[in-house]
Image (cartoon, coloured by chain):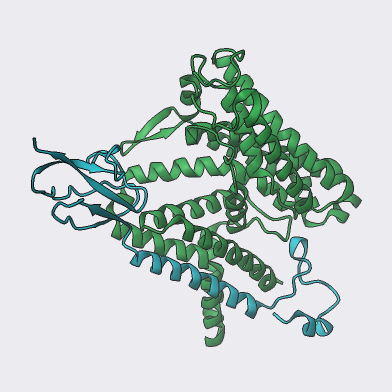
Chain colours: A green, B cyan
Amino acid sequence: MTNPVANLQRTAAEYKKMDQKDQKRFWSDMILNNALYILMAIFVIYTAIKEPSFRTLGSLANLLTQVAAYLPLALGIAGCIVLTGTDLSAGRVVGLTAAVAGVFMQKSDFANKMFTSIPEVSGGWIAATLLIVVLIGAAIGLVNGFFVAKFSLHPFIVTLSTQLITYGIILWFFALNGNNGQPISGLSREYKDFVGGAMFRLGGVAVPRYVLYAALLTALMWFIWNKTTFGKNMFAVGSNAEAAKVSGVNVFMTTMLVHTLAGAMYGYAGFIEGVRAGSVAASTGLNAECDAIAACVIGGVSFVGGTGKISGIILGVFVLRIIFVALTMLGVDSSSLYIIKGAIILCACALDMRKYLVKK
Amino acid sequence: MDEQSKAPEQEQTPKFRGLYRHVNISVKALDRIIIACIAVIVLIVVLEMRNPGFTIVFDSKGGTDVPAQNQMYGQLLEQPEPPTREGYVFDGWYEDPACDILWDVEEDIIETDMTLYAGWQKIE
């Protein structure tokens, strides 16, 4: 880790040596490279002035909750991006696992219970369900990983097809046992408490338990990325698969594992999604991968491959969420938010390329 | 960008690795893209900010006019002035013209543009 203060001093010393033209370029470089952060800062300050409710602790709690909900997906997808790939199936995997978790966690006395033979919800059953949905996610990830690793197919192709196939399975699942596509609701109190129960309150707004889980998952991912051979191999494969192979890295295994791990993260995200939304519908998780990919790119997980930090991903999710919370408070319609999201992704990619070119 | 005409003077080694390896773009062009994206985002936000929110129109159905309100998503209505009508007593605002679904001014939050209809009870 480099010391940020020393870095700043060095930059300041370099800046003093520059002539006027270089100084001008230094500033324009800095403004452009940090354009999205500056934009976020402007939105936040403006919203804070305009909307007093944005400055409250409750709004911070709301932001934390949202970040915790979107973080697992971004952490999963980031690994695929480090391998110069991507994962388009993330959102649908969340939808499927949310549906499975929802069915397993329905109240036993709920009139519309999909499978009456499913046991009453208890602590052990919740743990088993979590394990099952994580395994389902991991299995889909494994399929993605296998095709990408074995045949060097581009992840776009593989994950697009698993996305569609998973959606088909979701629709099948919702049609099971006379359910005929109804949303899955009537989630049991124990499940809701386990996932969304209030840990403490910030400014009157409850902070749910999954904020803690997200923090634990982040720590786990940090450990995997930075302290394990698998993590180091992942970056090696991402920056140059050929070179990694020559130096003895098992590229096939690494690629499979990255996708499997990503799938497991989507499985977890699905587990909390039902509680977050109150019920699960066939459309649950739609386009969730777009937000996750955008967050990763904003956070410096480059499409160039082989670069990225967990702290960057957290920052990316945070920036994206805070922009959306602020914009929603300013009354920006959700339809415009899609256009803004698109512009943010394009801008983040351009920034990504720009940093790479300038460094070269 | 005109990529074909630039191709011959391009060096053999690609500029990027990974997902961008076929991209052929200059820093100048990237700067323009970044600035354009930021401009689009700011423009949309400014345009949206001029949008005062959802419009709630009151149809007093023969009673005295009640001015429309503009409110943001998730907010409550400001208590509208109750309309009056000859021979009727006003009994609240409804979401449907048939006056079946009552709109609770103190509880219900606004989620869209809408028209509320006055409910009238005939004085016997």
For the point 69% across and 49% down, which residue is it? A88
Q: Place residue B121 in its image quadrant.
A: top left
Q: Place residue A306 in its image quadrant.
A: bottom right
Where does the image place residue A74, in percent across and percent down from the top left?
Answer: 61, 46
For the point 35% across and 59% down, which residue is it? A47
Asked whether the viewer can see residue A250, the reply is no
Asked whether the viewer can see residue B104, the reply is yes
For the point 68% across and 40% down, which residue is it? A167
Where does the image place residue A183, in percent across and percent down from the top left?
Answer: 54, 32
Where does the image place residue A52, in percent across and percent down from the top left?
Answer: 27, 53
- Is A55 located above or below residue B34 in the figure? above
For the point 66% across and 47% down, which residue is it? A77
Farthest residue to the right: give it.
A246
Farthest residue to the front: give it.
B124
Left or right: where does residue A283 sit relative to residue A56?
right
Q: Place residue A271 in its image quadrant.
A: top right
